[in-house]
Image (tube, helix red, strand yellow):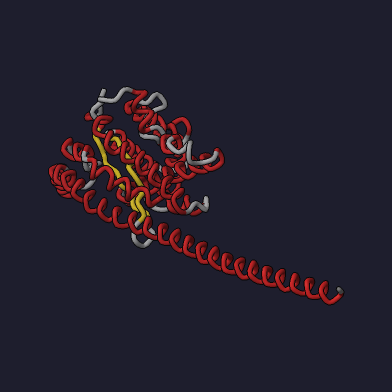
């Protein structure tokens, strides 16, 4: 009897041992398959991120080529103004000592150039290039994969709509509310309410503000450099700092393309007041010659409206400004 019990127990232990070994073996196999699947999924995710970045770079290059075509017309339209300016400078150089003539000229954009923005292909390509500026922001949020792609695409779609609507805005064909919905300072963050948290949206608004400030800095740094030695360093640094403070202020709607009511003309009026405040603030910091040059500089700036389109990262990481200059007389009433 004891022998039978021992035999049965031994057989039962053997069966249990085999079952445990089989289960352990199956578990190891499933674990290896899971690990392989996870690694493969991560590899695919990395490939997706890389492909998305490559696509953005290639489309940005395409946008750059098409934007050159866009600016070609503007350059041709500004040629006569350049020739006239050169003639005036020659005349000034030949004038008697003691007299002075100074002309502030600007390159304008013709209606034909604005019409090119109506091209869906061009608008999309330009927006793709501008979208590269948000890669650092998306990296800061540690967004990856399909979620990152959806956010980037939403940003690009919003910018493409702005490019496509720009001819109507400049022609006065948009109502103030419609213009504010498309070109308002928080339009880009408003399009991402379903994709980002409140904290992420707040950080996006801050990032957009930094981009606008950097764009203004690039624009007016170049302008002051071209203004001549009268506003050279260190005066130019003081002027630039004061101008940026006023142009980026809440009173100027933070440098937005539109005024607080959605009007371009009100934005121009607010900008002119910002120039006046900056001039008053600089009165004690500049000498008589510098103030005279600043007054002429501001007068030239008030005669036109600089439409800041985008900051676009270059191949070496440098930022370049995409903008156009429209005479105030050509803006819609």
Residue in the image at 41% along x and 42% along y: 212
Question: Which residue sits furthest front?
Answer: 1
Residue in the image at 27% along x and 56% along y: 61
Q: Quadrant of the C terminus?
A: top left
101, 186: nearer the viewer: 186
Question: Residue 7, how many percent across, how many down?
Answer: 79, 75
Question: Residue 22, how many percent across, how many down?
Answer: 63, 69
Q: How many marks?
A: 0
Above or below for 263 versus 26: above
137, 241: nearer the viewer: 137
Name the side, left or right, on which 2 lies relative to 114. right
Question: Which residue sits furthest bottom?
Answer: 3
Question: Residue 263, how many percent across, how many down?
Answer: 34, 25
The answer to whether residue 65 of the structure is visible from this angle is yes
254, 176: nearer the viewer: 176
Residue in the image at 23% along x and 44% along y: 121
Question: Residue 39, how many percent across, how many down?
Answer: 50, 65
The answer to whether residue 278 of the structure is visible from this angle is no
- Which quadrant holds residue 286? top left
Q: Quadrant of the N terminus?
A: bottom right
312, 236: nearer the viewer: 312
Above or below for 164 versus 142: above
- Which quadrant holds residue 110? top left
Question: Which residue sits furthest right?
Answer: 2
């Amino acid at each position: 009897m004891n022998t039978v019990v021992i035999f049965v127990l031994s057989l039962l232990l053997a069966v249990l041992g085999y079952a445990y070994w089989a289960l352990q073996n199956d578990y190891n196999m499933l674990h290896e398959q899971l690990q392989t699947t996870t690694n493969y999924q991560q590899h695919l995710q990395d490939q997706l991120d890389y492909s998305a970045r490559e696509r953005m770079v290639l489309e940005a290059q395409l946008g750059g080529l098409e934007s050159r075509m866009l600016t070609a017309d503007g350059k041709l339209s500004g040629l006569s103004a350049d020739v006239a300016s050169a003639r005036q400078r020659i005349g000034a150089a030949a004038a008697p000592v003691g007299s002075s003539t100074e002309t502030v000229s600007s390159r304008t954009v013709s209606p034909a150039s604005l019409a090119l923005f109506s091209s869906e292909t061009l608008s999309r390509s330009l927006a793709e290039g501008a979208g590269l500026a948000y890669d650092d922001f998306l990296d800061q949020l540690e967004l990856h994969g399909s979620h990152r792609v959806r956010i980037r695409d939403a940003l690009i779609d919003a910018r493409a709509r702005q490019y496509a609507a720009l001819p109507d805005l400049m022609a006065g064909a948009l109502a103030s509310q419609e213009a504010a919905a498309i070109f308002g300072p928080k339009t880009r963050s408003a399009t991402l309410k379903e994709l980002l948290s409140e904290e992420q949206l707040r950080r996006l608004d801050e990032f957009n503000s930094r981009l606008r400030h950097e764009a203004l800095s690039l624009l007016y740094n170049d302008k002051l450099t071209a203004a001549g030695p009268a506003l050279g360093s260190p005066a130019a640094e003081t002027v630039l700092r004061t101008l940026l403070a006023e142009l980026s202020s809440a009173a100027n709607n933070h440098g937005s393309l539109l005024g607080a009511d959605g009007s371009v003309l009100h934005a121009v009026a607010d900008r002119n007041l910002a120039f006046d405040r900056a001039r008053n603030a600089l009165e004690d910091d500049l000498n008589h010659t510098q103030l005279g040059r600043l007054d002429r500089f501001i007068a030239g700036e008030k005669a036109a409206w600089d439409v800041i389109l985008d900051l676009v990262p270059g191949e070496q990481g440098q930022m370049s400004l995409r903008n156009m200059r429209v005479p105030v007389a050509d803006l819609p009433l």
